[in-house]
Image (tube, rainbow, N blue to C red):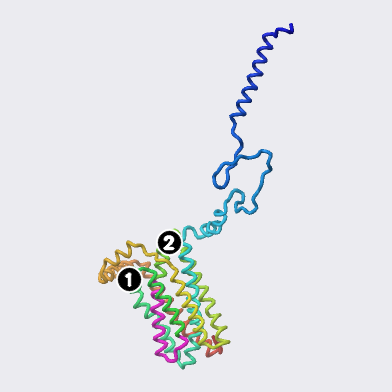
C-alpha cells in the first residue's frame, strides 16, 4: 500500500508541481520596480525603502514650477481675456504720467495767468488755442500714423506735450503762452491719434472695451491726482514749480512710450506708402462724407460739440475766475 502511490495522489502531485513551476517562472519574468527620474531615466526602486519628499522642489501636488509661475498670468488672462497686456500696460503707465501734467495745468494755469496780468478774455484764448491746433493737426497726424507707423508719432507727441508742460514754467507774456499752448495742441493731437490706433491694433471687437478701459482709467486717475499735486506744490514752492515737476513727469511718460512696440500691420503701412498724399486726402474726405450721412453719427457729433463748448467754457474759464474772485481760492 505504501510502496506504490495511488493514481489520485500522482495526479495531485503533478498539479502541485506544475503550479509551483509556473509561479517561479512568472516571478523570473516580472521586471523589478522602477521609478522615473526628472531627467526621464528609469531607476530601480527598493521596495523596503521609505518614500522621500524633496522640500526644495518647486512641484506641489503634481504642478511644476513653470505652471505655478504662470498663475498670475492666467489670472490676468481670465480678467482681461486675450488682451495684449504688455502693450496696454506700457501705454497706460505712460498715459498716467502724461495726465498728471494735464490735471496740474488745469489747476495752475489760472493763477499763472493772473500773476501775468492776463484777464478772462485772453485766458480763454489760451485755452482755445489747444483745440484749435488739434482741429488742424488731427488729420495729418492720422496720415503719419498710417505712413510711418504708430510708434514714432506716439513718442513724438508725448515727448512734445511733456516738454511743453515743462516750458509753461518759463513763460512771462501772453505771446509766449500761445506758443507753448500751440505745442501742447500739436503734441496732444499726435498722442491722441497714435494711442487710439495702438489700442485698436492690439484689440478686436470682442475685447476692445477692456483694452481701452485701462488707458481711460489711467488718464482719469492722472487728471484726478494732478490738481491735488498742483495745490500741494504751489502752496510750498510757488505756481511755477508745478510746471517744473509735472513737466518732468510728462517727459518721463514720453520716454516710457519708447518701450511701446510698433503695432501697425505691415500690409497697412505698405498700402499707405504706396498711395500719394492726394489719394489719402481723397479717401479720408469720402469716409468723412459717408459718416456725416448717418443721422445717428451726425446727432452724436452735435451733442459732443455742444457739451464740449459748455463744459470747457465753464471748467477752464468761468469757474476758475469765479473761485478766485468771489471765494479767494488759490491753486
Estimate the x, y position of residue 276 in percent, counting from the top left: 25, 69
For label 1, the SS is helix
Instruction: Estimate how packed mark 1 is, as few (under 14), some (14 to 19) or many (20 or more) residues with alpha carbons within 10 Å.
Output: some
Mark 1 or mark 2, earlier in chain: 1
Q: Position of residue 119 (x, y in %)?
A: 45, 91
Q: Which residues are magenta?
A: 168-193
- Relative to residue 165, is residue 63 drawn left or right? right
Residue 152 lies in what quarter of the image? bottom left
Q: Are marks 1 and 2 in contact (CB under 8 Å)?
A: no
Name the residue at the top extreme.
1
Q: Position of residue 138 (x, y in %)?
A: 36, 74
Question: In the depicted view, which residue is nearer to us: 107 or 34?
Answer: 34
188 in the magenta segment: yes
In the depicted structure, whether residue 76 falls above or below residue 135? above
Picture coordinates of residue 325, whole percent (x, y): 52, 90
Q: In the rendering, which numbered label is found on residue 143?
A: 1
Q: Determine crowd level at label 2: few under 14, some 14-19, many 20+ residues with C-alpha closer than 10 A.
A: some
The residue tagged 2 is 203
- Per the image, label 2 sits on a secondary structure element best described as loop
Q: Which residue is located at x 42 percent, y 87 percent?
A: 177
The quadrant of the image that shows the N terminus is: top right
The quadrant where residue 291 appears: bottom left
**Magenta region includes residue 105:** no
Front in this rendered view, residue 299 or 227? 227
When the figure is inspected, residue 261 is found, relative to residue 45, above or below; the finding is: below
Q: Is residue 186 above or below residue 90?
A: below
User: Image quarter for residue 21?
Assistant: top right
Q: Given the current orientation, which residue lies at the most extreme bottom position?
A: 117
Amino acid at each position: 500500500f505504501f510502496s506504490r502511490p495511488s493514481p489520485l495522489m500522482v495526479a495531485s502531485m503533478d498539479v502541485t508541481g506544475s503550479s509551483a513551476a509556473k509561479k517561479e517562472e512568472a516571478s523570473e519574468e516580472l521586471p523589478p520596480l522602477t521609478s522615473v527620474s526628472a531627467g526621464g531615466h528609469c531607476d530601480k526602486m527598493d521596495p523596503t525603502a521609505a518614500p522621500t519628499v524633496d522640500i526644495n522642489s518647486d512641484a506641489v501636488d503634481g504642478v511644476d514650477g513653470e505652471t505655478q509661475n504662470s498663475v498670475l498670468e492666467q489670472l490676468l488672462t481670465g480678467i482681461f481675456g486675450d488682451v495684449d497686456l504688455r502693450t496696454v500696460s506700457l501705454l497706460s503707465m505712460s498715459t498716467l504720467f502724461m495726465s498728471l501734467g494735464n490735471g496740474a495745468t488745469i489747476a495752475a494755469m489760472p493763477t499763472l495767468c493772473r500773476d501775468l496780468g492776463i484777464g478772462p478774455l485772453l485766458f480763454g484764448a489760451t485755452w482755445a488755442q489747444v483745440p484749435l491746433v488739434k482741429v488742424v493737426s488731427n488729420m495729418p497726424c492720422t496720415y503719419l500714423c498710417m505712413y510711418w507707423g504708430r510708434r514714432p508719432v506716439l513718442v513724438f507727441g508725448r515727448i512734445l506735450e511733456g516738454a511743453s508742460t515743462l516750458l509753461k514754467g518759463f513763460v512771462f507774456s501772453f505771446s509766449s503762452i500761445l506758443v507753448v499752448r500751440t505745442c501742447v495742441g500739436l503734441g496732444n493731437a499726435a498722442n491722441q491719434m497714435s494711442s487710439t490706433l495702438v489700442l485698436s491694433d492690439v484689440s478686436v471687437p470682442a475685447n476692445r472695451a477692456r483694452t481701452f478701459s485701462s488707458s481711460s482709467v489711467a488718464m482719469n486717475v492722472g487728471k484726478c491726482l494732478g490738481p491735488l499735486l498742483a495745490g500741494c506744490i504751489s502752496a510750498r514752492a510757488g505756481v511755477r514749480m508745478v510746471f517744473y515737476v509735472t513737466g518732468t513727469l510728462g517727459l518721463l511718460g514720453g520716454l516710457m512710450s519708447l518701450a511701446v512696440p510698433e503695432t501697425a500691420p505691415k500690409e497697412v503701412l505698405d498700402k499707405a506708402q504706396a498711395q500719394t498724399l492726394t489719394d489719402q486726402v481723397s479717401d479720408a474726405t469720402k469716409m468723412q462724407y459717408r459718416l456725416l450721412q448717418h443721422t445717428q453719427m451726425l446727432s452724436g457729433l452735435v451733442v459732443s460739440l455742444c457739451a464740449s463748448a459748455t463744459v470747457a467754457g465753464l471748467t477752464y474759464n468761468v469757474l476758475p475766475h469765479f473761485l478766485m474772485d468771489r471765494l479767494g481760492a488759490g491753486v
